[in-house]
Image: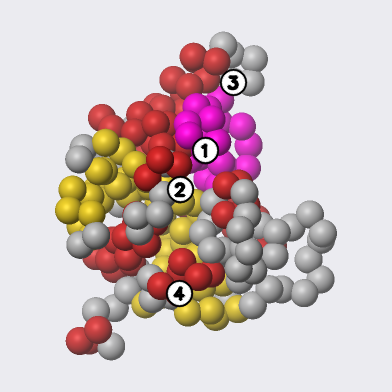
Amino acid sequence: MAKTPRARDLEIRPLTPARADDVKTITASTWGSQCWDLWWRFTKPVTTVTAPKDKREGQRRAILAKLARRRHTPVLVAYDGGEPVGFVSLGPRSDYERFRAQKTTQPVDDVPAWVIPCMTVRKAYRGQRIALALLRAAVEYAGAHGAPAIEGYPRAGEKRFDDGSVSMGTPALFRRAGFRTIRGVQPGMPGYYAPRVTMRASCVPTKTR
């Protein structure tokens, strides 16, 4: 789908049902093998809690593969020489039950913007601008599928956080990808909520803006 000039062999492609395991490969280096990038989509468990681990993974794989058969992909995957190295998840807000329930990710206005709930790059491939390429590809992909804009909700602050804290990206990364802040940290949030800003990029081609 897209390439970056800094990594000649880097390609970013929509996830296909046959490549669902690539998401697990990427998340295994960050959050463990049980993460299939489904947490934001559902407010209830998506697998049988008492089932054996391999059965639960099979259930998650099947859900992700089914999502990948839709008109718009649930995930864009970055490949370096054919090896899956990072991903960004994206889609209409209506796709994400938990996202709609969170107080820090509520809409700012009536623009039907797509959202970016999660992104990550495998540890061995960080520092190569892969996350930046993924964000730029997300803007392009959302626009190609009719989205007027796309939003991210990075954690506020510029200091280094652990992987779990920056799974939604950082403000600096979104700025480099052309996003602008449209809402700052909301006051009065419970202490257990991570402070987040809302950043948006237009998906309308420059020549038609």
Q: Position of residue 125 (x, y in %)?
A: 37, 45
Element on which disc 4 rests: helix
User: In the image shown, does 15 or 31 lie closer to the viewer?
Assistant: 31
* Disc 4 residue type (three-letter): Arg
**Residue placed under numbered mark 3 in the picture:** 48
**Residue placed under numbered mark 4 in the picture:** 175
Judge whether 44 appears above or below 112 on screen: above
Judge whether 100 appears above or below 85 on screen: below
Residue 120 appearing in the image? yes
User: Disc 1 to disc 4, how far (Cα)?
Assistant: 24 Å
**Residue placed under numbered mark 2 in the picture:** 120
Name the N-terminal-most of marks 2 and 3.
Answer: 3
**Residue placed under numbered mark 1 in the picture:** 30
User: Disc 2 to disc 4, how far (Cα)?
Assistant: 17 Å
Q: Position of residue 161 (x, y in %)?
A: 63, 54
Q: Position of residue 30 (x, y in %)?
A: 52, 38
Badge 4: how crowded within 10 Å, few (<14), some, or many (20+)? some
Name the N-terminal-most of marks 1 and 4.
Answer: 1
